[in-house]
Amino acid sequence: MKKIGIEKPCSENWNNMNPTEKGAFCQKCAKQVYDFSNQSLQEIKLTLLEFRGQSLCVRMTVTQDEELNAEFKLWLAKKRRNPQQLFIAALLIVFGLTLFSCQDKRDQQTIQSVQEIAYNIASGQADKLEPVTVQEEFIAPLAPPELIEYENYIMGAYPAPVVYDMPPQVPEIVEPEVHLLGDASENTSVMRFLQETTDVELDENGVPFPTEFKALAFPNPAVENTTLEIQAPEKERMQVNLYDTSGKFIREIHSGKVARGTFRQPIDLNDLSSGLYLIIIQSKEFKETVRVIKN
């Protein structure tokens, strides 16, 4: 049973949409589609929380969907289980202490039967107390606290290519990830989950600081211009250069410090012929490659 995700599957082709800063724009629906495929779970939860109560169309990988729902189900299970566990614990204590004060064997047998049933519920072997008759005496069923049932959600998925890193002169073969596309759904329990499990540091403008390094180019493919976006979790010096696929240096894009947060640099492609180009980002700690297609 899925609790977070796409309620109504979308059959639109992601590749036919117009690329935007946040993902793509769907002409048929006239809506912005947010691309979650390169975001962490914390970033996804923060975006869902930011747009709570609104219709949000998203694109995410199957892996992200499974991880997000696994975390939500674990959180929900704890919320559902706690009242019942307290009830069972109290039941075991009361009847356990009473057992030592019983002198009548019939009373001991009755209490032991109740304790056994309570233990089965606490250990997950049973989910309710069944009626028990001991020597013509009837023990009434004790119902656990009421559990709240939440509506189901249906997820839709279709294969789509994903942009991957490829170092100069060494092509890398990457299997495309399966993506989900459609309207993200929410309910009251989902909002509580997002609020309780989302802990993101915000800058002075209320925008979350990146938790890990990421780089992408949009639009991609591009005709005349594209924009390089770098999400930097820490301030550091970076060297950014443009190469062709043979490893030939074309020009420098940026050289200097990049502040913590989101850095954007426009790139003019007018003087380049059609083809694939590599944007190489390098610092003391890492080296990242972003590929961009010029049409």
Image (spheres, grey):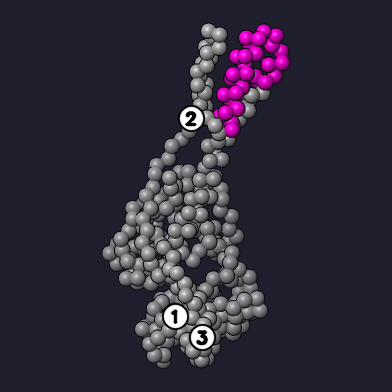
- Magenta span: predominant SS is helix
Q: Which amino acid lies under the numbered mark 2 shown in the image of this protein? A: Glu
Badge 1 is on which residue?
Answer: 292
Magenta span: 94-123
Residue 137 appears left or right of 102: left
User: Helix or strand or loop: what does disc 1 sit on?
Assistant: strand
Label of residue 169 in the image: 3
Please name the residue shown 60% across and 27% down the image. 119
Please determine whether, in this image, residue 213 is positioned above or below residue 292.
above
The residue at the point 52 percent across, 42 percent down is: 76
Q: Position of residue 255 (x, y in %)?
A: 59, 85
> In percent of the image, x 52 and y 30: which residue is there?
126
Inspect this view and state whether residue 51 appears.
yes
Alpha carbons under labels 2 and 3: distance apart: 62 Å
Labelled disc at residue 146: 2
Q: Depth check: give the residue in front, 161 or 216.
A: 161
Check disc 2: other Cα within 10 Å, few if <14, some if 14-19, many if 20+.
Answer: few
Question: Which residue is located at x 32 percent, y 58 percent?
Answer: 10
**Is residue 145 among what the camera can see?**
no
Q: Quadrant of residue 59?
A: bottom left
**Between tags 2 and 3, which lies in front?**
3
Alpha carbons under labels 3 and 1: distance apart: 15 Å
Query: Does label 2 or label 3 sit earlier along the sequence?
Result: 2
Q: Distance between the residues labelled 1 and 2?
A: 55 Å
Nearer to the camera, 48 or 242: 242
Q: Which of marks 1 and 2 is nearer the N terminus?
A: 2
Residue 253 has which mark? none
Query: How would you rate the neighbour count of disc 1 (Cα within 10 Å): few for under 14, some for 14-19, many for 20 or more?
Result: many
Name the quarter where the N terminus is drawn: top left
Instruction: Give, as a three-letter code, the residue at label 3.
Output: Gln
Estimate the x, y position of residue 256 in percent, counting from the top left: 61, 83
